Image (cartoon, rainbow, N blue to C red):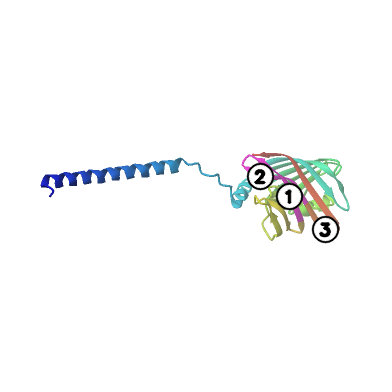
Amino acid sequence: MLRKADVLSFTSYEATAHRALKVLGAALLFTLAACSAQKPQPQQTPSHSTQQQSAAALQRWEVKGKLGVRSPRENGSANLVWQQANTNYRIHLSGPLGAGSTTITGAPNGVSLQKGSDPAVFASNPAQLTEQIMGWPLPVSEMFYWVRGLAAPGAVSGQQKNAEGLLQSLQQAGWQLNFSDYQVVGPYKLPSRIKAASSNPAGPVSVTVVVKEWIPK
């Protein structure tokens, strides 16, 4: 038969063991939580929408490259310097295409085109103005988006993107476009080559922009 002292001693031992198990369990949980916190997390690939928003955020830049044109009235290329500041732009073409220097300056209220020392001509639509003066349309309003690898506002069809969500081709505003040779420019991924083709009433027109240098502002 157990004595009262033995029972009390056993009860005290049981309580002490129970408390020890609690402390050990808490320490184990703390260790597991610490290990979980230190475990390296896999890098997440930016979503397609994040990449597009990043390109759309680029509103000021200087682009240097070449512009090539094939049309019933003109075949050739020119050096291109495109300066953009939000909705204002200045596109300077120099070289064989157009026989000399051409400057296209635009703002929300209109666009002007000056060839060499000729007086500037003003209009509201840059594509119509370039077709009138140079013999081929340059869709500058849409190119503001296309040059960044984005679709312009308005109807779009045949849009295709690669696995990274970068635009590869689309049809818009009467033009078939192809985008290629994307390059990393700071936080942006931007196309280095944009080819646009249109079945113009006066004959097919092909415009190719090759970007040699992107300078975000």
Tag in front: 1 or 3: 1
Based on the picture, tell me whether residue 2 belongs to the magenta stretch: no
Give the CA separation, mark 3 to mark 2: 31 Å
Q: Which residue is mark 1?
A: 179
Amino acid type of the residue that numbered disc 3 sits on in the rendered structure: Asn
Residue 151 location, quadrant: bottom right
Amino acid type of the residue that numbered disc 1 sits on in the rendered structure: Phe
Q: Give the image location of residue 161, x and y in percent.
A: 68, 54
Residue 113 visible (yes or no)? yes
Which quadrant is home to the C terminus? top right
Tag in front: 3 or 2: 2
205 displayed left or right of 28: right
Q: Which residue is mark 2?
A: 189
User: Which label is found at residue 200?
Assistant: 3
Q: Name the main secondary structure of what is drawn in magenta.
A: strand
| Residue bounds of the magenta highlight | 176-195
Q: Give the image location of residue 125, x and y in percent.
A: 74, 54
Identified at 68% across, 43% down, the residue is: 84
Q: Give the image location of residue 142, x and y in percent.
A: 71, 53
Q: Secondary structure at mark 2?
A: strand
